[in-house]
Image: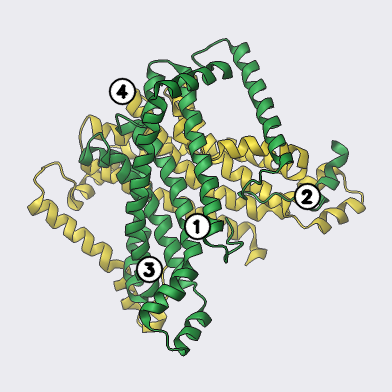
Chain colours: A green, B yellow
Amino acid sequence: MAANATTAVTSPGTIAVPGAAPRFTKTRLFRAIRSFAVFLAIWWAVAAWVENPIQLPTPGRVATALFDLAASGELLEHMMISVTRLVIALLVSVALAVPLGFFMGLNARANAYLDPLVELLRPISGIAWIPLALFIFGVGDVLPVFIMVYVAFFPLLLNTIAGVRNVDRRLVDAARTMGVGRAAMLRKVIVPAAFPTVMVGFRLAFAGAWAAIIAAELIGSPSGLGFAIEWYRQLLMSPKVFAFITMIGMIGYVCDVGLRALQRRLTPWADGTGL
Amino acid sequence: MTTATASVNGSAWRRVLELTLVPLALVVVWQLWGMYLATDARAPVPSRVAATFVDLVANGGLVGALLQSLTRVVVGFAIALVTGTTLGLLMGSYPWLRDSLDPIIEAFRPLAPMAILPIVLLWFGTGTPAATAIVTYAAFFPLLVNTVHGVTRVDRRLVQAASTMGVPRTSILLRVVLPAALPSILLGARLSMGIAWTAIIAAELGVGAKSGGGTSGGIGQMMFVFYSYSIDLNAIVVCMIVVGVVALLIDRLFRIAERRLMPWRQ
């Protein structure tokens, strides 16, 4: 393997773009299975060596717990609660951030006045809002939704503004020359041209919101996946803790892959938007 | 970010107005709301927030908590920097290693740092090691992914030239590949430091909440104590502003470092 060192760096065609969607070709799937097999074997060996089922349960016990939770419906229940909150929060965030983003992107004056406020609030992470929001909304459904709306708002807003402002001037000029009206200009020229960037913002918003919901539910909610992991931790039922964490990871992964696919499907004209 | 309307309008005071009008108006409305409309005497108001800030700085509580949080972030970030860039260099250089580890990393990357809090609590208890572990986890992935990205994009002719001249492999890695990948690594460092700062607040909040107020310390836990014990909303707002300012300073610091370390990119 050492002999490959230099050729490895220089060998063409194997450049893995990080963040690129995995293609489920046969070799790729095989590699993934092999990697996970090794990972599970190491986990199992360490768990057997540690011999502490509370600190590190074996993969087998976690799988059993996952199966039991799925069979009893508890897994689906917490999952639906979290996913519903996520969907509501993302819808609210899109409804707030995208129109505002278009307004700020099209109107330089408004942007000049509103941007300082955005830049002042943006560094305050959604997590830091949890104690104050906990006091205002109490423990329940509103807190996680509020935190997620806040977290998802900024990437959506900034990407929408950037998307609108970076619309090719020549497109706008060409449309104007041909006598296209304001409404049609917005609908037929600016929206399609800005859409790929908005999609990128939406993916960032999803990733941020899905990370924030775990913190929000863990600290201030009586239900949801974030609540479940901490609840079973307090009961020292580690296999269930690991099972729920696996579920959180899987949902995040599947949604990300899905959003990438959706992005390619919805904005086929924008290949290579990066990210 | 901001538009350069100053040059358009040709007056500096207009720019100042643009920058301050909306935030100042908001503060004034907030103050009036707190003085005349708020029904709860505990409601945070700008004037009381400012007074609380002075108190918290004077009694040393805020500075102590902030230093504790920053120390944890720096330690966690340093561990992630060493492990993340080392593994990233290796993965970027050896395709077989990259192919083997990629599926595992892609599986763990979308997992929120807070999701591993219960495991961390089981392993490390409720003190500094737990908070540092979460920071390390959070900071690790942006560093790793950006290092791999940077290394795989290194100009192959540089490596070939060095290899033709008989430079040993480790030297190529450290003298050619590492500097060439530096822009990407520094970008990863900036992203990961930002995430680490968010993660430490989350970790301290969570640890504080789950260890009954606890002894974990740090600014995140301080916020939770203000929420659940003294119910001092002004102090919570002080902490939020401090958290925001530190986030901003960290970001600026890394941007300056990027410019200083890579003057050729100007």
Specify whether disc 1 shares its chain with disc 3.
yes
Residue picked out by circle 1:
A200
The x, y position of residue B136, in whole percent, is 54, 35
Task: Indicate the amino acid at tag 1.
Answer: Val
Instruction: Write the residue at 43% across / 49% down.
Output: B247
Tell me how far mark 2 sits from mark 4, CA to CA.
51 Å
The x, y position of residue B204, in whole percent, is 39, 32
Q: Which of marks 1 and 4 is in front?
A: 1
Q: Is mark 4 on a helix, strand or loop?
A: loop
* Label ID, residue B175: 2
Q: Are marks 2 and 4 in contact (CB under 8 Å)?
A: no
Tell me how far mark 4 sits from mark 3, CA to CA.
45 Å
Report the side of B108 relative to B175 (left or right).
left
Report the side of B56 relative to B114 (left or right).
left
Q: Nearer the viewer, mark 2 or mark 4?
A: 4
* Label ID, residue B212: 4
